[in-house]
Amino acid sequence: MSAQPSPEARQDYNALLDALMPFAEQMLKQHGEFFPFGAAINPAGEVTAHAAADGSEQPPSEELIALLVQGLQAEARAGKIRAAGICYDGRIVQDGKKVDAVILTL
């Protein structure tokens, strides 16, 4: 039997989804793609945006995701955030075909 998230955690996850998905959709409509980005919930319950850069013009998404994860984990360990999410452009298999997808990790 798996544990269910608390009502507070569900509220945080919904706030993260509400912050991440509209921005991903906007970037897809305007540019057809986007670099990985994230958001977090601070202890006061406020949503903050997060991004990563490695100094190059077209950095690999895997590197940016790793930088985001490292940064968010460090903030969580320091007690600066209580929830976080990362959003990136990916591909999944649907009906035997690879299709573009927005991937969210909370």
Image: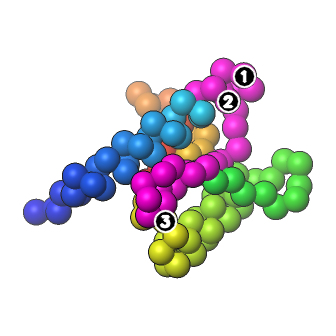
Residue shown at the point (63%, 26%) measured from the top left: 26
Residues under numbered marks 2 and 1 in contact, where contact means CB atoms less than 8 Å apart: yes
Magenta-tinted stretch: 25-49
- Amino acid type at circle 3 is Ile
Residue 74: percent from left, percent from top: 57, 75
Q: Is residue 43 magenta?
A: yes
Tag 3 secondary structure: loop
Corner quadrant of residue 4: bottom left
Q: State whether residue 43 is above or below residue 59.
A: below
- Direction front: furthest residue: 44
Separation of marks 3 and 1 at Cα, in angstroms: 30 Å
Residue 14: percent from left, percent from top: 37, 42
- Mark 3 is surrounded, within 10 Å at the Cα level, by few (under 14), some (14 to 19) or many (20 or more) other residues, namely many
- Amino acid type at circle 2 is Met
Corner quadrant of residue 100: top right
Q: Residue under label 1, please give it.
A: 30
- Which circle, 3 or 1, is nearer the viewer? 3
Q: Residue under label 3, please give it.
A: 81
Residue shown at the point (17%, 62%) measured from the top left: 3
Residue 25: percent from left, percent from top: 58, 27
Q: State whether residue 97 is above or below residue 1.
A: above
Q: Residue under label 2, please give it.
A: 27
Q: State whether residue 40 is above or below residue 31.
A: below
Tag 1 secondary structure: helix
- Amino acid type at circle 1 is Gln
Tell me the number on the disc at residue 57: none
- Mark 2 is surrounded, within 10 Å at the Cα level, by few (under 14), some (14 to 19) or many (20 or more) other residues, namely some
Between 47 and 94, the one lying in front of the other is 47
Residues under numbered marks 3 and 2 in contact, where contact means CB atoms less than 8 Å apart: no
Separation of marks 3 and 2 at Cα, in angstroms: 25 Å
